[in-house]
Amino acid sequence: MLYFENDYSEGAAPEVMGRLLETNPVSQPGYGEDEYTLRAVSLIRKALGAPEADIFFISGGTQTNALAIGGLLRPWEGVVAAGTGHINVHEAGAVEFTGHKVMTIPGVDGKLDPEALRRYLAAFHRDPNREHMVYPGMVYISHPTEYGTLYTSGELRELAEICRLYSIPLYMDGARLAYALGAGPGPGLSEIAELCDVFYIGGTKCGALCGEALVFPKGAPEHFLTVVKQRGALLAKGRLCGAQFEALFEDGLYERLGRRTVELAMRLKDGLLSRGIELFVDSPTNQQFIVADEKLLRALDAAVRYSYWEPVGEGRHAIRLAVSWATPESSLDELFAVIDAALSEKA
């Protein structure tokens, strides 16, 4: 079976696993006070150009989103996101479970449109009944988005300016941030740190065994570590995430893994397009979305693990093919062979 279902089917990049094995027998303090976590924090601060940043290592993405959003919003506030946003669609109401509403507005190819956000916030603050409503207290975006699309530097800056106009934080979900960085032009780490009030650097989907780095570039709110502990997110063995992020940021491994994966994804895209396969959305990252008819789906079902996305109509379906840091190039050749066989059967 060929695996194109997601980017977290494998364990950890060899360099990361090697670091875990190398440090495994060494006794260290707990709760993030170990030398590996402290060095990881220093390396990430340097990569961001943000020496005052506070960084918390959390085990997974859903927990990170719920912690960051639930921990920052006041009781009467909610978070604004695109309707397709991960927190709205694929996190089983984790944010709502914290007591905060996800307030959605239409997106464009998964992205939150700055003008739509501006209109939404302006309309809310003009509404004389707003005291009876949930206040928009934060803006959520993901980069890459659920559709593998990316924000430009200009779009990110415009969103940040809107948030600052209304004095609300801009939060970026960076579950696949390595692949955004690997895709080339666009906001780099230092620009993200400049424009976002809080964001996370994804590890689970980007070469780590597990773990995400939640970053407050200008410093965390008071007592945020206590909030992490209170919500069950503070690992006693903080070294588990610390050692992994130390390896990922020690010599540019994080961005190298992203570039290699995106290069492979572009080979996948080119192969699909050359065979006349229709793209559902044009993604520059490791997630590729195609439109498949019933016959192609049957052929893929027999040999390929993929993610079903949504019906397109008239017996056609959008599916996702994702590559990861661990995908061998030979898997692409085998996938193309499956597709070629299905196309030739149709002819």
Image (tube, rainbow, N blue to C red):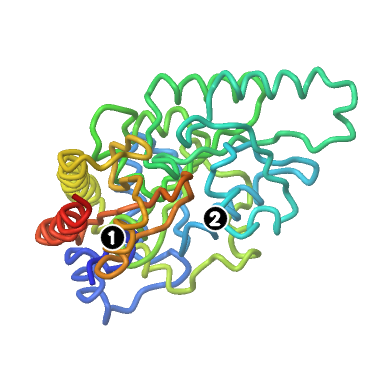
Residue position for label 1? 4
**Amino acid at the residue labelled 1:** Phe
SS under mark 1: loop
Circle 2: is it few (<14), some (14-19), or many (20+) Cα within 10 Å? Answer: few
**Quarter of the view holding residue 194:** top left
| Residue 317 placement, left or right of 231 | left
The residue located at (60%, 33%) in the rendering is 169
The residue located at (60%, 52%) in the rendering is 224
Towards the viewer: 249 or 145: 145
| Residue 280 placement, left or right of 61 | left
SS under mark 2: loop
Percent of width and height locating residue 110: 48, 37
Percent of width and height locating residue 345: 19, 57
State whether residue 107 is above or below residue 172.
above
Q: Nearer the viewer, mark 1 or mark 2?
A: 1
The residue located at (35%, 62%) in the rendering is 242
Q: Pointers 1 and 2 in contact (CB under 8 A)? A: no
Residue position for label 2? 90
Circle 1: is it few (<14), some (14-19), or many (20+) Cα within 10 Å? Answer: many
| Image quarter of the N terminus | bottom left
**Amino acid at the residue labelled 2:** His
State whether residue 195 is above or below residue 340.
above
State whether residue 96 is above or below residue 239.
above
| Residue 328 placement, left or right of 233 | left
